[in-house]
Amino acid sequence: MSLVYLREIDSQTKFAIWRIEESDDDLLSKLQLDEREKAKLGSFNKGKRRLHWLATRVLLRTLLNTSRYIDCPSDANGKPYLANFPQKISLSHSFDYAAAMISTKGEVGIDMEIIKTKVERIQHKFLKPAELAFIAQDENRYEQLYACWCAKEAIYKLQGNAGVSFLNNMTIQPFDYQLQGILKLELHSDQHTHLYDVHYEKFNEYMLAYAVE
């Protein structure tokens, strides 16, 4: 596995992307797993899902720069967390890549997706008509749709509530798409609306989005 991208956002927050090139046995040899984690890994068939799970854990070890055992369970909503380190984390993977983000500042969210034209078929499932109205009608259309999808996925991971809807609880303010930029996303709840700055950028044939609380 090779590090292809590392960004230190500030002294407390950073993320990295790795290209997965090893076998699952190679990745497994870099980890220390307890019985719960071994059982989790054993529930996956050989293939991408198993590689993704292993690769994100190896990447966490690299970002934390530690040889200690890393206890990384998931909470009741499926959000991964570190039980024996202070950092907040977020994990993502898509095809041949894995991504991880860590911070001692606050909750984080990161998402990475390969860009495909099929996103147009489901755009109405995650974007309101008012959001679709500002999507470009040119060659950047698919990239902008993925910037929106990844931004909502990143905030979904950051806030950690499984009941949040991309369509009903999140609204992206109009923005002009660039290869790298910041969009503003409103997260609506019964009590209040929280506004997030979500960074997005195109990475090869992928879209990446991330946010820090």
Image: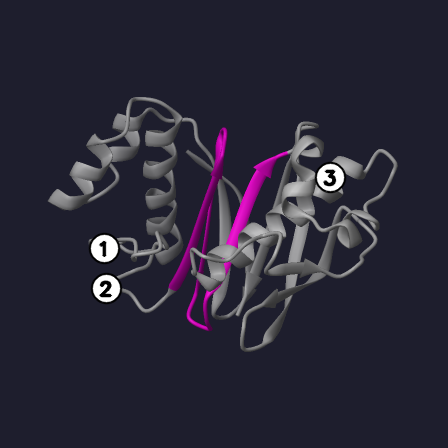
Q: Are marks 2 and 1 in contact (CB under 8 Å)?
A: yes
Q: Residue at x 33, y 43 (%)?
A: 58
Q: Main secondary structure of the magenta part?
A: strand
- Amino acid beneath label 1: Asp
- Amino acid beneath label 3: Glu
* Horizontal side of residue 160 vs 71, given as left or right: right
> Quadrant of the rendered structure where residue 181 is?
bottom right
Disc nearest the viewer among 1 and 3: 3
Query: Whole-percent x and y of residue 86?
Result: 32, 69
Q: Which mark is residue 143?
A: 3
Q: Is residue 185 magenta?
A: no
Q: Residue furthest right?
A: 138
Task: From the image, tell me which residue sits under label 2.
Answer: 84
Q: Residue at x 23, y 35 (%)?
A: 41
* Horizontal side of residue 65 vs 14, given as left or right: left
In terms of secondary structure, where does tag 3 sit? helix
Q: Is residue 7 visible?
A: no
Q: Is residue 129 visible?
A: yes
The image shows residue 99, relative to residue 130, as above or below, that is above
The image shows residue 127, relative to residue 182, as above or below, that is above
Task: From the image, tell me which residue sits under label 1.
Answer: 71
> Quadrant of the rendered structure where residue 40 is?
top left
Q: Residue furthest top?
A: 46
Viewport quadrant of the N terminus: top left
* Horizontal side of residue 202 vs 189, given as left or right: right
| Range of residues picked out in magenta | 88-114
Query: Whole-percent x and y of residue 183?
Result: 72, 59
Q: Are marks 1 and 3 in contact (CB under 8 Å)?
A: no
Q: Residue at x 54, y 73 (%)?
A: 190
In terms of secondary structure, where does tag 2 sit? loop
